[in-house]
Image (cartoon, grey):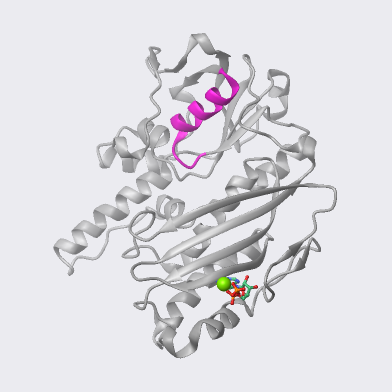
Amino acid sequence: MLENQSTTTLENIGEFGLIDLLTSSIKIHHSSTQKGVGDDAAVIDHGNLKTLISTDLLLEGIHFDLSYFPLKHLGYKAITSNLSDIYAMNAMPKQVTVSIGISSKFTLEAVEELYAGMLFACNRYEVDLVGGDTSSSKQGLVISVTAIGEAEADDIVYRNGAKPGDLLCVTGDLGAAYTGFQLLEREKRVYLANPEIQPDLEGKDYIIERQLKPEARKDIVLMLKHLNIKPTSMIDISDGLSSEIFHLCANAKTGMYLYEDKIPIDPTSYNMARELDIDPTLTALSGGEDYELLFTIAQSEYEKIKDNADITVIGYVCEEKEGIHMISKSGNKHPLKAQGWKAF
Ligand code: ADP
Ligand code: MG
C-alpha cells in the first residue's frame, strides 16, 4: 500500500509513545464513559442499566492469516466480531478495551493500520475505546478485545428461552464468510505455487468482504425494538448455523426443525461453494463467522416480520424428545449434526 511506504520500528517509539500515538484520536461517544484511556482503569457508569461483558482472543495463525488479511480489516473485524456478542444479548455495546501483543516484525505503521481499522469500527458502531494493554510478543500478533454493553434487565435475551412452537429466524444470509475464506485460501495456494499469478477475485467482492470485514447486526437489535419484538432466545452465528441451533436447544431443552430450502444463501456464495465442490448448505450449517443473529420468536409475532427482507424464518422449535432435524430440499428428515468448520 502506498501510504505505508515509511517504516518506523516499534523499538524507536517505545511502549508509552506507541500507546499515546494509537489512542490520541479516540473519540468518546457516551456519557457513560466517565474516564477512558489514560489512568489505571477506565470508569464506566451505566446507571440503573445492567452491564454486559464479552471477551474474545485472536491469535495469528489460529484465527487469522496475515498473508491475505489486511491489518485494517483485521482491526475492524476484531471489534465487530466482539460487538456481535453483545448485540446477541439484545443489548447495546458502549465501550471496548483492546489489548495487543506485537512481535518485532511489525512496524509502527502496521500497528497504526490495525488501530485505524479498530477505531473505524468503534466510530461506526458508536462505541468508546476506553483502555487496553500493549505488550511485545515473541511470535505473532495477539489481539484481545473486551466489549462492555448495557441493557434494561427486561430487554436482555438469553440463549435459553425458546419454547416449542416458536419460530426460528435468522438475519441476512449465511455461508459467505466461509466461501470467502475458502476462496482466499485457494488463491493463496495458487500464489505460493507461482507468485507470478495474480489472485483471481473478480466478481467475488461480497464473499471476500464477508470474510475480511464482517458487520455486526446493531441494525437488527434496533429494528426488533422498533417492531416491539423481544426474541425468546438469541445467539450470534460465529461457529455455524447448526452448532448455534444446538446451543439454543441445549439451553432451552427443546428440539428443532430446520428447513434446508429456507436457509438464506447469497448467489455469489452459492456459486463459489459449487465451484469449490462444497455443498452450499454445508457452508451455512458449518461455515461460521457470519455474525448474523439467530433467534426464536413467538408465533404471534409472525405478522410483524413476515415481509421483512432482513429476517428469514428457517424453522421452528419442537419438544426436546422430537430431536433436532433438518428437512432437506427433497423433503427427507435428517438428524442435524453440530459440526464445526473442522468437519470440512
Ligand atoms: P498500566 O501499566 O497501568 O497497565 P499502561 O501503561 O499499560 O498502564 O496503559 C496506560 C493507559 O493506556 C491505560 O489507560 C490503558 O488502558 C491504556 N492502553 C494501553 N494500551 C492500550 C491499547 N492498546 N489500546 C488502548 N488503550 C491502551
Ligand atoms: Mg498495561
Could you tell me residue 153's position as x and y percent? 78, 38
Q: Residue at x 45, y 81 (%)?
A: 109
Locate residue 276 relative to residue 337 in the image: left or right.
left
Say which of 94 and 304 sits in front. Answer: 94
Q: Residue 280 occupies which quadrant of the picture?
A: top left
Bounds of the magenta segment: 237-253
Say which of 247 and 87 sits in front. Answer: 247
In this view, 4 is above or below 222: below
Q: Which quadrant does the N terminus fall into?
A: bottom left
In this view, 309 is above or below 142: above
In this view, 273 is above or below 73: above
Could you tell me residue 299's position as x and y percent? 68, 18
Count the labels in the image: 0
Q: Is residue 314 visible?
A: no
Is 342 included in the stretch rendered in magenta?
Answer: no
Is 238 included in the stretch rendered in magenta?
Answer: yes
Could you tell me residue 81's position as x and y percent? 53, 52
Q: Residue at x 21, y 57 (%)?
A: 189
Q: Residue 273 occupies which quadrant of the picture?
A: top left
Q: Residue at x 47, y 73 (%)?
A: 135
Q: Is residue 99 visible?
A: yes
Q: Residue at x 69, y 42 (%)?
A: 221
Q: Which quadrant does the C terminus fall into?
A: top left
Q: Single out the residue that lies furthest toward the top.
A: 321
Could you tell me residue 116's position as x and y percent? 54, 72
Q: Looking at the image, in which quadrant does ligand 2 appear?
A: bottom right
In this view, 307 is above or below 147: above
Name the main secondary structure of what is drawn in magenta: helix
